[in-house]
Amino acid sequence: MLSDILSPDVFAAAMRIATPLALAAIGGTICERAGVVNIALEGMMLFGAFVGVIAVTYAGNPWVGVFAAAAAGASLALMHAFASVTLKTDQVVSGTAINILAGGLTGFFMEVIIGHPGTTDPVPRLVPVFDFPVPSAGFFAPMWRWIDVIFLSHTPIVYGTILFAIVAHWALFHTRWGLRLRALGEHPRAADTVGISVVRGRYSAVLFSGVLAGLAGANLTLEQVGSFTEGMTNGRGFIALAANIFGRWTPGGSYGAALLFGFAEALQTKLQLLRDVITIPSQFFLMLPYVLTVVVLAGVVGRAVAPAAVGKPYEKG
Amino acid sequence: MDARFRRFLALLVAFALLATMAIGCAGTDDTTDDTDTGDGAAEVDFSVAMITDVGGLGDKSFNDGVYAGLENARDDLGVEIRAVESNEIADYEPNIDQVASAGYNMIFTVGFLMTDTTIKKAPEYEDVYFVGIDQFIEEPADNTVGVLFKEHEGAYLAGVVAGLATLDPDLDDRINDDNVIGFVGGMDIPPVEKFQAGFIAGARSVNPDVQVISLYTGDFDDPAKGKEMALSAIDQGADIVFAAAGLSGAGGVPAAQERGALFIGVDQDQYLTIPGSGDVMLTSSMKLLDVAAYDLIKSAVDGAFPGGSIVEFGLAEGGVALAPFHDFEDKISQEILDAIAKAEQDILSGAITVPASRAEL
């Protein structure tokens, strides 16, 4: 039983499940570090997932869809930036409006472009990057199977996300760009005083988060499922927001929190097998990822402090 | 300056919300006016509306099934039809109010989750016939019929197929040596549990040692999650996965294609409703909601609506069935065909009572 539960595919599944969450969470981190709350990650992810599939339907190549998804996320992000930076509106209201808008837009264009609601027809997907032959016997075969399944079985965006997390983490804390970005979220007036453009900085951060959320959507449709289903993000954007907070507003922490949630989710799938032995409602297992995430992170991570100026529009002068 | 911007923004947001609502309504209200559907269809002054469950139209599953029944009734009987989609559970009541006050004669509330809403709303509109699909209603009101399916009887047949097929390497080279098959359910609610219980019972009836890995996704509209569940079952040795989880279950098709396994669909003949699934779609455990919906509309039009009762559609009533094997037609062994025929006979004659819950297994 234990070998069934702790098998390499649990860890591989954890990485797959974590990817869309981590991408959106890193986007949220960048955005909030610059002082803008992005509650619209869910809608940007959904819109990216949809536009990605539509683009592949016409272009045939999944990579075209990936770029289209990123652009779609960025287009909604532009609306969010315009409303929250230029117009100085309440960022939660603008984000909520965009989430509702994304649900409506995707449902409407399903009917217009695909001709029916529900699910689109399948499109070509991105395939795993590596395809090594697995040795069937020998001393290293079991070990190789673990390595192959956990680390070498994935699609491009899964690896890209790890790379993003590392680069973004380094850039945020070890480059001049990162220092300036953080200044926008901590003390925009100080940044403005030394000649950093608050408006331009916040715009680029919001757009960047839109690109990452769009890529998260592309991962769902163009790597995992191969078709778009209305509402298929199913709250992942909000879990990403939580992962960003649990990760203490750092890209590395966001990835870690997403991975933990992914692992808990993969584990509960295996734990459902216990129902053959003892009678436990399935809802109990479905709840586990959320409980485990909260418990572990509350215990390990401790108090998280948000950027001081997050959510506050910057009034010049 | 700033105040003007704020006012502009408030307008913008209001407009965005309004536009979204308009778009939402345009996308979901499938009103059909063309009651003059050619020869044979006599015009009757009768209108039927359905309230979908949260899966909505296009779920390639039970909402679409009921709608197909409505469409048949429109074409054959000349009734006017309309579907209103529920995006969330909170939409159920306003949707019912909307169509009931618009003067529809008959309302289908689709899905187990709407049971309480049907019980609450039916007495408020005494002149309207209510049909609750997948709803067990104790002592239904005189204008209400609860429709239940014997999903377990159809799933039993699918279980017979899977139980024998997993032992039959000649069927397909994707059949492995492990005596393991998988079940992916959506929410853990009675209609889904009936599928699970019937499937397991059917598989065990022909293959007592078979291990059935049963997993629940907890929802009906998250194909990525359904795919992970199917992958998990396949990684543990399952070579055939039966998914009864609406659109979440449809994620099992790419999972089976990626890992080299076979898939059994649910509710409709999913070979036809999920394009590109033919290479893995062994069969489907169909729930013929269109038959049930059509029958009830016809009885209402004929003035014989069985109000105040629960109507059950099983194998005998043509309410559940096994879909054709399509691409596997030539590969299915005579042994499997004989076993299906025998199981059907035994269920119809009452020689077997198929368990409808895990407790009865």
Image (spheres, helix red, strand yellow):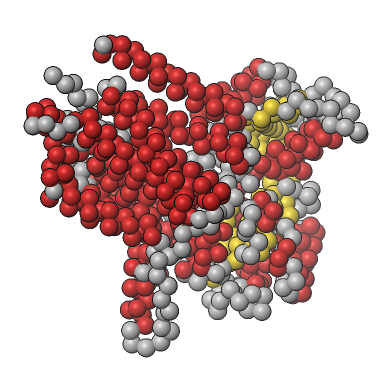
Q: Nearer the viewer, residue A159 or B288?
A: A159
Above or below: residue B327 compared with residue A34: below
Q: How many marks?
A: 0
Residue A54 x, y percent position in the rendering = 53, 45
Q: Residue at the spot x=77%, y=74% of the render?
A: B334
- Image quadrant holding the N terminus of chain A, namely bottom left
Would residue B342 be seen by someone viewing this image from the given angle?
Answer: yes
**Position of residue B240 in the picture relative to residue B224 (left or right):** right
Residue A184 x, y percent position in the rendering = 16, 34
Q: Nearer the viewer, residue A200 or B329?
A: A200
Q: Residue at the spot x=60%, y=36% of the render?
A: A111
**Position of residue A176 in the picture relative to residue B69 (left or right):** left
Q: Nearer the viewer, residue A287 or A64?
A: A64
- Image quadrant holding the C terminus of chain A, namely top left
Q: Residue at the spot x=67%, y=57% of the render?
A: B271
Residue B267 x, y percent position in the rendering = 66, 50
Residue A260 x, y percent position in the rendering = 29, 54
**Position of residue A246 in the picture relative to residue B64 (left or right):** left
Q: Residue furthest front?
A: A195
Above or below: residue B215 compared with residue B240: above
Q: Residue at the spot x=43%, y=45% of the render?
A: A69
Place residue B183 in its image quadrant.
Answer: bottom right
Q: Nearer the viewer, residue B298 or A45?
A: A45
